[in-house]
Image (cartoon, rainbow, N blue to C red):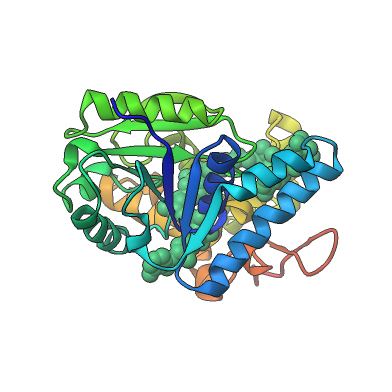
Amino acid sequence: MSEIKNVGVLGGGLMGAGIAQVAAASGFTTRVREVSDAYAQKARGGIEKRLAGAIEKGKLTAAQRDATLANLSYTTAVSDLKDCDIVIEAVVEELDVKNAMWKELDALCPPRTIFASNTSSLTIAAMAAATTRGDRMVGLHFFNPVPVMKLVEVVKTVTTSSETFTRAFEFAKKLGKEPIAAKDNSGFVVNLLLVPYLIDAINALEHGVASVADIDKGMQLGTGYPMGPFTLLDFVGLDTTYKIAEIMFDEYREKRYAPPPLLKRMVMAGMFGRKSGKGFYDYAVDPPRVSELGL
Ligand code: CAA
Ligand code: NAD
């Protein structure tokens, strides 16, 4: 088994930037591909800010920060990831977008390169089918915020070789994560259970069960969740959650995965949650206040 040294990350958004930060901090040479210089600068700025925060808290030394930053580089060319030993994809939850990038890299990367997707709800099989390296395609599903959350779901699809699965599993451990093995069903393990819960919370709100603040408070204080469902929805991104729900509903044709109309309306209005400044909460003020949703 060839050793993984160079890591490529497609996408420097919420997840891609977190994955790149963790890979670089774990000693891997890491290159992030973003769609534009402006987005690449945003990813870089976010990572630098988090590292500075960790130094301030005394959890990181300046030397460790410098070592992490020295491992990181940014590009806007997908082809610049061609020499990586593993490419981790973390772009928008759209199969066509992901597969266009996999196809491009499939033609450029050497046989040793593993393709790993961080998809929340698409199947790994649907991406493997777009390449000639189905045996080297695997799921590596990280959780948000990546530097904090310990779990990674390692997903083996029908074509994934045992060698690829083992390499990906060991790689997740080298990132300091706790990997679990998951089957290639839409939503893997965690989202299969988490997504219906988030959808139920929106449905409860639409049905007037309680307010945003009280549902959040109820789940946080009544069940010990670190965040209530609406805070978590804003944290994950409503645009991403909407796409995940659509994909899971399409796969299973079960009402429990159907994206609620309110979620659709909010996405149409550009209310994506924290990343756009407004979702179930309005982040223009501190502390954030519950948004007016016309309910
Ligand atoms: N990025 C990086 N680090 C972050 C962060 C972020 N966005 N937000 C918080 N942190 C770090 C803080 O720096 C702090 O680090 P230290 O302990 O080293 O000081 C630590 O997290 C705790 O932060 P806080 O004390 O500020 O806040 P908290 O105790 O409320 O924890 C939280 C924040 C870790 C995000 C916590 O609220 C939590 O666990 N929330 C639930 C997150 C969750 O469920 N994630 C899964 C989402 S679903 C998913 O990812 C899958 C999918 O496909 C959609
Ligand atoms: P995000 O919105 O923060 O970032 C999206 C990324 O996709 C950005 O880097 C953006 O530049 C890139 N992108 C957008 N359009 C593109 C295009 N046409 N071509 C190439 N790149 C494009 O999203 P995110 O939350 O980082 O999610 C990324 C992936 O990770 C998705 O597959 C999502 O399902 C998955 N995921 C998300 C979470 C979460 O909590 N947000 C958790 C686990 C997995």
Which image quarter is the N terminus in?
A: top left
Q: Is residue 225 above or below residue 208?
A: above
Nearer the observer, 53 or 109: 109
Q: Is residue 288 above or below residue 179?
A: below
Residue 136 shown left or right of residue 175 in the figure: left
Instruction: Identify the residue at horizontal 38%, vertical 67% (top origin).
Output: 77
* Residue 94 screen position, x and y as percent: 34, 60
Instruction: Identify the residue at horizontal 41%, vertical 24% (top origin).
Output: 170
Nearer the observer, 165 or 78: 78
Residue 203 visible within the image: no
Q: Is residue 279 above or below residue 199?
A: below
Q: Quadrant of residue 221?
A: top right
Which image quarter is the C terminus in?
A: bottom right
Instruction: Identify the residue at horizontal 73%, vertical 55% (top origin).
Output: 49
Nearer the observer, 92 or 58: 58
Residue 22 shown left or right of residue 33 in the figure: right
Quarter of the image where ligand 1 sits: top right
* Residue 108 screen position, x and y as percent: 23, 56
Residue 278 shown left or right of residue 190 in the figure: right
* Residue 162 screen position, x and y as percent: 23, 23
Instruction: Identify the residue at horizontal 59%, vertical 46% (top origin).
Output: 21
* Tally of numbered tags: 0
* Residue 92 screen position, x and y as percent: 42, 60
Nearer the observer, 39 or 150: 39
Residue 72 visible within the image: yes
